């Protein structure tokens, strides 16, 4: 395990998702360059930030809660003799109208990271809770934050054996047992549960509604790419959308980025070229291979497309409003005699150094969200196999094909496990989703912003009168879940209002079915 541990330690210092994995197999990927992990948001910024821009845009964060722990089962699907573990959850009862009035429970399905971080970026729940008299519950996803099945992070992440309970099915079962127990404790068995989630958390919300319809009456799944599996959507969709976002802002910016990859390779292949690149890009240490730089740049472009919000935010890292516009301004804005890489550096500095407080990049400071990255890498290598490719016809990224065999071999080498690329569609579905869900499912809301590269794997069409897609052409990655700000555009205000209306309808229907005597009479009459 020594090598792997060092590997993860190194991963700690990285801003990126892929690097630790690439390092495990550096040569292979330096040559093949085929491995692209699905990039989901993670907390990238290590420094302090005054949030000056953010507070200009909004007011005080509405997100308040107390922290509790629940003794959880490690493996819900076997009856091995083993201990339990402490699952952290966040709870806010101050708006709850109580069990007697069937006050609803809004449960945010914890993502691949610290629950507090996701809660703080999901102010929408707190803002709408008072009008519904709702209790807010945020169970943390196992293996993230403080919810470690084997006590410590090190023990939980030790090897494939200890990691084997890191699956979405186990996480859903955690949510199900926790909320059921909480309702019992509150004598609130009859209170309706509404699920929420963004990104992977949104996928969990949607899947939980399908798997546990007796536990939750509806699900708001924001930016949930539940179709990004196997061949349901084309594998080039993610990078195609990132590229289109840049092209929309500026064709010359798009072209500069597109041309930069060859320039980088050319310099890197020269004697001392990597050192030159390291200097030019203000790296804290020398780059070991050109893919390190390529990946660092790709990460910036991909993440900034996810958070291309019309308001300043500090979700992953502090950023101005319309960050792609700002990057392209920096890329295009340099005088004519500046070369391509100077432009690239100016652009990417908006993403990695907006505060101007970063001394150098790819630091060796241990960060605090590395477990999020490591855990997600495990998930991506086991269940969450999301095909990724880049097509020269529609992408500003260097072209590459999706290579499932290569991907699976690398996962086997790194973790000693065999990926199961068909498992998600087998256990949750996704193929022919319209036909399948139309007659069987209900009360699901899929919201997507089309600037978000994950929208390519999202549900973008209405499936039935109660399985609804809300599509915002100018939206990005689950912007709707964030707290309102004073400068929110109208479409965002309207989108949130539509979501509230759907939730209200689900709850009203639940009340009608549960409290109106004539319904009972109908059922009896039916016999
Ligand atoms: C419910 O109450 C029991 C007994 O106090 C406690 O052990 C358990 O953790 C509670 N459940 C939740 C979800 O907090
Ligand atoms: C870079 O390569 C050198 C020499 O091969 C190695 O000692 C070092 O650990 C590598 N650094 C990283 C961060 O991979
Ligand atoms: C970050 O920005 C500041 C202010 O522009 C600059 O002085 C510093 O060199 C930048 N850091 C890096 C790593 O480029
Ligand atoms: C790019 O487009 C051309 C013309 O439509 C097509 O022939 C070619 O196969 C496409 N290339 C890729 C990699 O899809
Ligand atoms: C789906 O139906 C809702 C009305 O329930 C509508 O507001 C929305 O625009 C429709 N979505 C799409 C993608 O057509």
Image (spheres, rainbow, N blue to C red):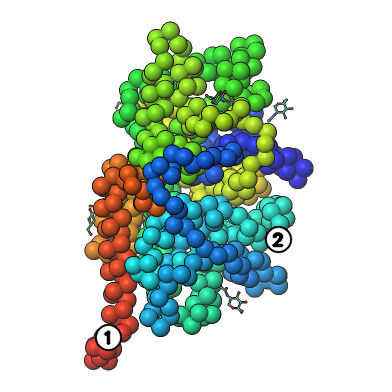
In this picture, is 506 found above or below 10?
below
Task: Tell me the quarter of the image containing the C terminus.
Answer: bottom left
Pointer 2: residues within 10 angstroms few (<14), some, or many (20+)?
some
In the image shown, does 484 or 426 lie closer to the viewer? 484
Find the distance from the CA under tag 1 to the CA under tag 2.
Answer: 47 Å
In the image shown, does 467 or 60 lie closer to the viewer? 60
Q: Hey, which quadrant is residue 252 in on the image?
A: top left
Report x, y in % for residue 473. Answer: 28, 42
Report x, y in % for residue 121. Answer: 46, 51
Residue located beneath label 2 in the image: 151
Which residue does the image show at 36% across and 48% down from the upper left?
485
Which residue does the image show at 43% across and 78% down from the upper left?
98
Report x, y in % for residue 18. Answer: 57, 37
Which residue reaches farthest right? 2
- Do we see residue 491 in this rendering? yes
Secondary structure found at label 2? loop
Q: Is residue 441 left or right of residue 267?
A: left
Total label count? 2
Of the two numbered discs 1 and 2 on the same chain, state the one appearing first in sequence.
2
Report x, y in % for residue 420. Answer: 53, 52
- Residue behind label 1 places its C-beta within 8 angstroms of ligand 5: no
Secondary structure found at label 1? loop
- Residue behind label 2 places its C-beta within 8 angstroms of ligand 1: no
Pointer 1: residues within 10 angstroms few (<14), some, or many (20+)?
few
Which residue does the image show at 31% across and 84% down from the upper left?
515
- Do we see residue 456 in this rendering? no
Residue located beneath label 1 in the image: 516
Q: Hey, which quadrant is residue 5 in on the image?
A: top right
Q: Which mark is residue 321?
A: none
Which residue does the image show at 31% across and 78% down from the upper left?
511
Task: Tell me the quarter of the image containing the N terminus.
Answer: top right
In this picture, is 201 found above or below 52?
below
């Amino acid at each position: 395990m020594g090598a792997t541990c060092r590997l993860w330690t190194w991963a700690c210092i990285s801003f990126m998702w892929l690097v630790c994995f690439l390092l495990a197999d550096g040569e292979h990927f330096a040559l093949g360059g085929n491995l692209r992990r699905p990039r989901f948001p993670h907390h990238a910024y290590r420094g302090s930030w005054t949030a000056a821009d953010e507070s200009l845009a909004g007011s005080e964060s509405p997100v308040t809660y107390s922290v509790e722990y629940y003794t959880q089962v490690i493996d819900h699907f076997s009856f091995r003799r083993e201990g339990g573990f402490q699952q952290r959850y966040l709870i806010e009862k101050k708006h709850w109208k109580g069990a007697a009035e069937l006050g609803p429970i809004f449960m945010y399905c914890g993502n691949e990271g610290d629950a507090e971080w996701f809660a703080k970026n999901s102010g929408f729940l707190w803002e709408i809770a008072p009008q519904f008299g709702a209790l807010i519950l945020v169970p943390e996803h196992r293996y993230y934050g403080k919810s470690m099945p084997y006590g410590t992070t090190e023990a939980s992440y030790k090897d494939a054996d200890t990691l084997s309970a890191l699956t979405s099915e186990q996480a859903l079962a955690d949510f199900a047992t926790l909320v059921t127990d909480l309702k019992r404790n509150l004598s609130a068995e009859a209170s309706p549960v509404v699920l929420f989630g963004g990104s992977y958390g949104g996928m969990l919300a949607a899947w939980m509604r399908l798997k546990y319809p007796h536990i939750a009456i509806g699900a708001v799944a924001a930016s949930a790419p539940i179709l990004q599996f196997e061949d349901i959507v084309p594998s080039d969709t993610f990078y195609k959308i990132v590229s289109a976002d840049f092209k929309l802002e500026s064709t010359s910016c798009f072209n500069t980025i597109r041309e930069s990859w060859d320039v980088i390779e050319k310099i890197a292949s020269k004697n001392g070229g990597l050192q030159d690149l390291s200097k030019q890009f203000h790296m804290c240490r020398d780059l070991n291979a050109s893919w390190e730089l390529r990946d660092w740049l790709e990460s910036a472009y991909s993440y900034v497309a996810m958070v291309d919000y019309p308001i300043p935010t500090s979700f992953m890292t502090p950023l101005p409003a319309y960050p792609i516009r700002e990057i392209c301004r920096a890329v295009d804005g340099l005088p004519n005699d500046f070369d391509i890489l100077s432009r690239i550096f100016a652009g990417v500095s908006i993403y990695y150094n907006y505060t101007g407080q970063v001394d150098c990049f790819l630091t060796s400071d241990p960060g605090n969200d590395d477990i999020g990255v490591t855990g997600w890498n495990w998930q991506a290598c086991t269940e969450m196999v999301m095909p990724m490719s880049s097509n020269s016809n529609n992408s500003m990224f260097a072209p590459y094909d999706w290579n499932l065999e290569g991907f699976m071999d690398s996962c086997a080498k790194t973790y000693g496990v065999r990926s199961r690329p068909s498992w998600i569609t087998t256990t949750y579905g996704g193929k022919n989703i319209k036909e399948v869900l139309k007659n069987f499912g209900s009360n699901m809301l899929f919201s997507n912003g089309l600037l978000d590269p994950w929208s390519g794997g999202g549900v973008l069409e209405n499936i039935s009168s109660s399985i609804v897609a809300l599509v915002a052409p100018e939206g990005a990655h689950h912007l709707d879940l964030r707290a309102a700000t004073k400068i929110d555009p109208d479409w965002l205000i309207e989108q949130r209002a539509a979501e509230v209306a759907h939730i209200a309808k689900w709850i009203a229907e639940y009340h009608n079915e549960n409290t109106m005597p004539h319904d009972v009479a109908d059922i009896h009459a039916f016999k």
